[in-house]
Image (cartoon, helix red, strand yellow):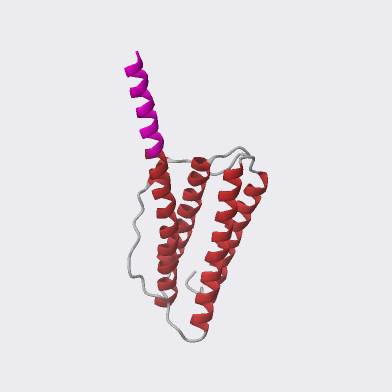
Amino acid sequence: MDGMTVQEVLAFAKILEENSNKFYSDAAKKAKLPNAKKFLDELAREELGHKELISNLEKKIDAGGDIPKITKKIKSLNISDFVAKHGLDDDADFIDILAVAMNKEKEAVKVYSTFAASLEDGKVKELFDFLINEEKRHLRRFEDDYDDYTDEMSHKKVSELIKKMRGR
């Protein structure tokens, strides 16, 4: 593992993003709900955007530039620890998609963290730390969306319950 170069790390990261793009694209093709299909297509495009970010980073490093410094460490809400969903059914809804997206980002963080923990080369380790933070940023976005959506659904259910109780 110690022999891993910056270029190999970036190539590996691009493959992870390509795999995620394919996962979301394939799921979008099978999705029955129009909003789910649209959201999955959006996620697939985002993964291509992540790959482009990595490609641009690769060009910058190849030209002698530095690995971007992490200005803010992203913290997870750890919602994905309680939401175990790794596959999508054809009739998946928004909450199902968010659960899978959270788990995919969490897996990427875990893979990058495993690599980073086993490295001695400071520049390669720094690159993995940057990629870990980017994946945590994506994870946090999905966790915030999940939290907002489930809060909204809970408020609706409580409101409906109160209306039923008043109607009795």
Q: Is residue 164 magenta?
A: yes
Looking at the rendered image, the quarter that the C terminus falls into is top left
Residue 128 in sight here: yes
Q: Main secondary structure of the magenta part?
A: helix
Query: Residue drawn at (47%, 72%), measured in percent from left and top?
Result: 2
Residue 118 in sight here: no
Q: Nearer the viewer, residue 84 or 138?
A: 138
Query: Residue drawn at (51%, 52%), measured in percent from left and top?
Result: 104
Q: Is residue 160 above or below residue 73?
A: above
Q: Is residue 159 magenta?
A: yes
| Left or right of 15, for residue 129 | left
| Left or right of 93, for residue 118 | left
Q: Is residue 23 above or below residue 61?
A: above
In terms of image quadrants, where is residue 119? bottom left
| The furthest residue to the right | 29
| The furthest residue to the bottom | 64
Q: Nearer the viewer, residue 102 or 32?
A: 32
**Residue 41 in the image, given as x and y percentages of width and height:** 60, 53
| The furthest residue to the top | 168
Q: Is residue 59 above or below residue 151?
A: below
| The furthest residue to the front | 167
**Residue 62 in the image, given as x and y percentages of width and height:** 52, 83
Count of labels in the image: 0
Query: Residue drawn at (37%, 48%), measured in percent from left and top?
Result: 78
**Residue 86 in the image, given as x and y percentages of width and height:** 54, 44
Per the rendered image, the range of residues in magenta is 152-168
